[in-house]
Each structure stands twice: as C-alpha cells, then as structure tokens.
Image (cartoon, rainbow, N blue to C red):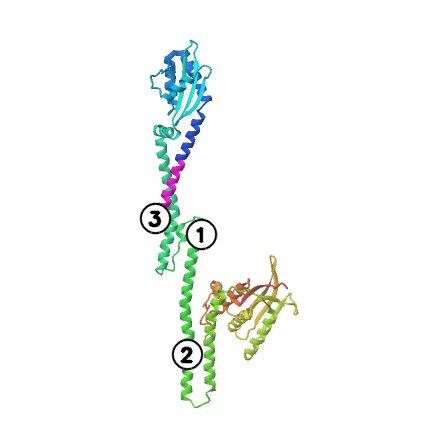
Amino acid sequence: MKSLFSKIFFCFWLMIILVIITTAFILYQSRLQSNELPLPLERSVIKAERAYEVRGLMGLKRWQRHTRDRFRPHKIYVIEYSRDIMNQTLPKSVQKISKRLTEKNASIQKPTGKFMYFGRYFKTSDNQEFRVIFERPPIYRAFLSHLANTGWTLLISLVFMSGIVCYWLARHLTLPVRALQKATQSLAQGDLDVEIAPKLGKRKDELSELAQDFDNMARQIKRAYNNQRRLVHDMSHELRAPIARMQVALAILESSENDPLPMTKRIQHELDHFESVIKQTLSLPSFENAEISLTDPVNIHETLKSLINDFQFEFQDQQLKVNLELKDLSEDAPITVLSKDNWLSTVFRNIISNAVQYRHTDTNVTIVLSKFKKKTERFYRVEITNQGSGVNSTQIEEIFEPFYRADQARTPGTTNIGLGLSIVKAIIELHKGAVFAENIYNKNESIEAFRITLELPEHQH
C-alpha cells in the first residue's frame, strides 16, 4: 500500500469492520446477560412445569426443543432418573450438578471450566422429579455460533456498505492531494498560472484552505518571477542610457580643447544616477525583511518643513510651491512618531518627489497633516496631493509593487525605476501604519488630482 488512497481506504474500512463486530459482540453479550438467572430461567422452568402438567412428558419434550432453539447456543438438559428425557449424553459436569440439585437446594449457578451452568429443580403434582440444567459455552464461541447461524447476511451487508463509505471518504480526502501533486509538478515545470482551488468546487475545509494557500504561493512566485524579469529589463535600460551618455562625454573630452569641467560634471551626474539605482535596488529587501524596534522619536511636522524648504530651493527656477497645512493641530504641538534613523524622511522625500515630478506645469503640491483616532489608538494622517493626471484606477493598488511604473512614457528622462513607493510601503508597514493612493475627480468625473495618504501611530509620551 504505497498510495495514500489505499492507506486511508483500508485503514478506515478495517476500523469500521472492527467496530461493527465489536458492537455486535457487546450487544450479543448484553442479550445473554439479560437471559440469565434468575428471571428468564425461573420463567422457563415455570413453563416447563405447566407443559408437563398439561401434556405430560411429551409436552415437556416439546418445551425442551422450543427452549433450546430460543437460548441457542446454550444446551438444555431435562433430567429424570439421571438421564435426559431427549436421550442426550450427559457430561460429567452436568451429572455432578444434577446430583446437587434437590428439593432443599433447588437452584444452582456455577462456572465449571470454560462453561457456565444454571440448574433448577422442580417437582410435579404426581411427585415426578425433574432437573433443568442450562449449559452456556464460552462467550466468544457462543457469539461465533450465533453469527454463523443468523448474522452473516447482515454482517456482509454492513461490511459492503462501509466499504462504499470508506471509498468515498478516501477519494474525498485524496482528491485535493492529487490535484496539489499535479499542480506542484506543473509549477516545477514552469507553469506559473497553475491553480487548484477552482478544481475543488465548493468544499470548505482545511484542504481547500491548503489549495488557496498554494494558489497564493503560486501567484507570489509568478509576481516575484515577473519582478525579476522586469528588474533585469529596467536595470539594463536604466544603466545603458547613462553609460552611453558617459561614453559621449568621454569622446567629447578626448577630442575637445575646451574646458573639461562641464563634461566631468556630466559624468559625475551619471555616476550619481548609477549609485541611486543600485542603492534603491539593494535597500528594498532590507526594508521588506527588517524586524527592527523603532525607538527614535521623530517630529514629522519639522521633518516635512525641512523637506519642503529643500524642494522649493531645488525647483526655485520653476517657482514650485509646496503648501503645508495643519488640520486641528497647533504649530507648537509635539507631532511625533517612533521611527529609526531617517526612514520617515526617506518616505516623505520619495512621495513629495513623485508629486513634484508628475504634477502639471505651474501647479503646486499640497500637504495636509491631521490627527485621528482608530479604536483605542491615535494616528497622524499625512495627505500629499498634486494636480496631475493621476493613475489608472485599475492600477492604483499596483503602484506600491516593486519595479512598477504607471506610465513609463509620461515623464521622459526621469530616473525613476519603480522602487520608491515599494520602499515607502515597506517602511510604513514597519511602523504599523498604512499607505494608500487615490485619484481625485472633478464634476465631469475626470481626474484633476492625485493623493497619497500615510497613517502613522502617535508616539505616546
């Protein structure tokens, strides 16, 4: 029995057969015990006396035959003058008990060897003396004898029916396992679209949950595989362009007699881009797998003000304005959360950079900082909004996935490789917070703005 189906089927079937036989044995034993002395034998003896009084010895013999069939596999002896009235051979143990049965000692119940004997003495109206002795064999032998005579048909029917039930049960349990085995083989062969749960129908049990977990795992493997392919594509694209530009700059340096400073700055800029791409790529796994305690209180109001000054200075030629609004908060309130190093600065810088980068020309960025309560905890909410084209509503949830770009052509020449918001999500989740994005629509149901909202738990002083 190498297959799981065979093991389950035969184990359950044998167990049910054992239960059936054991139950039948217990019921049979209970029936025997209910037919023992004193009541059943007393009644039988009274009937024997009546049978003799009505029909004499012939009536007593008829009673003996009837009672023997009723109490089978017991043996019944009716003894008169030291012999059985039906001419049965008397065992020595029966002879001994018969001698002990007298008018003064009219009832005996005695085990002898493997047998149990029940004896009763009675005297008729014409002074004839009779001794009725019941001999019960060992209980297991009596049970087998009873089974052979009356119970085989029922037993075979029950075993057959239990076999059908066990077959269905074994099939029901092993079907998902076989489906999982085939799906695992398909996955190993490169089929990343394999699914099990739809094949199991409407069953709701641990095996269906296992199938759903497998499907989720397959989807995650597919996503990781696609991300890896996208990473190779994006990294090759991102690195090929600055390499080409540096080669051009070096060629110009070699052939030009002019001041080399502009070209060296250009090469330095491209090298900085190299470093940024590599740094973002390497930092994502460290944030996703981090298990670090947050112990540094950070004033997010001051952090935002500092970042706003940096961006407005950097984009002063574009007359960029980033507005910071406090909603139900005072300027001097200690608006702090627990963080580590400059993680939150990285988060805010990334989102504000995207808001600036993808806004419409000559429009501003708005940041609203507020406070709210969720159940028993207090949170700060940071809403960063720009006036831009937003993101396709079907892709809103995907912008926080690694290497995702909502529109690679909407801002040519950018250095974004699609890692920024995935890093934002990883950091915010480490803070036990939440991040989500949404489009803002005007009355004509067209997108007029895009907003990213952060929720961070308040630091309790």
Q: Nearer the viewer, residue 357 or 268?
A: 268
What residue sits 57% from the left and 76% below the top? 310
Foreground disc of the pair 3, 2: 3
Instruction: Tell me which amino acid carries mark 3.
Output: Ser
- Identified by mark 1, the residue type is Glu
Can you see residue 413?
no
Q: Nearer the viewer, residue 419 or 297?
A: 297
Q: Is residue 396 magenta?
A: no
Q: Residue at x 39, y 34 (%)?
A: 21
Query: Relative to 78, does residue 302 appear above or below in the rendering?
Result: below
Q: List the single residue furthest toward the bottom.
A: 257
Counting residues from the start of the chain, the first of labels 2 and 1 encountered is: 1
**Circle 2 sits in a helix, a strand or a loop, which is it?**
helix
Q: CA distance from mark 2 to mark 1?
A: 50 Å
Residue at label 3? 3
Q: Which mark is residue 243?
A: 2
The chief SS type of the magenta part is helix
Q: Is residue 24 above or below residue 3?
A: above
* Residue holding disc 1: 209
Residue that appears at 37% across and 55% down: 183
Provide residue 378's location: percent of width, then percent of height: 61, 61
Q: Which residues are magenta?
A: 1-20
Q: In this rendering, is residue 295 above or below 8?
A: below
**Residue flagged by tag 2: what amino acid is it?**
Ile
Q: CA distance from mark 3 to mark 1?
A: 23 Å
Count of all numbered marks drawn on residues in the image: 3
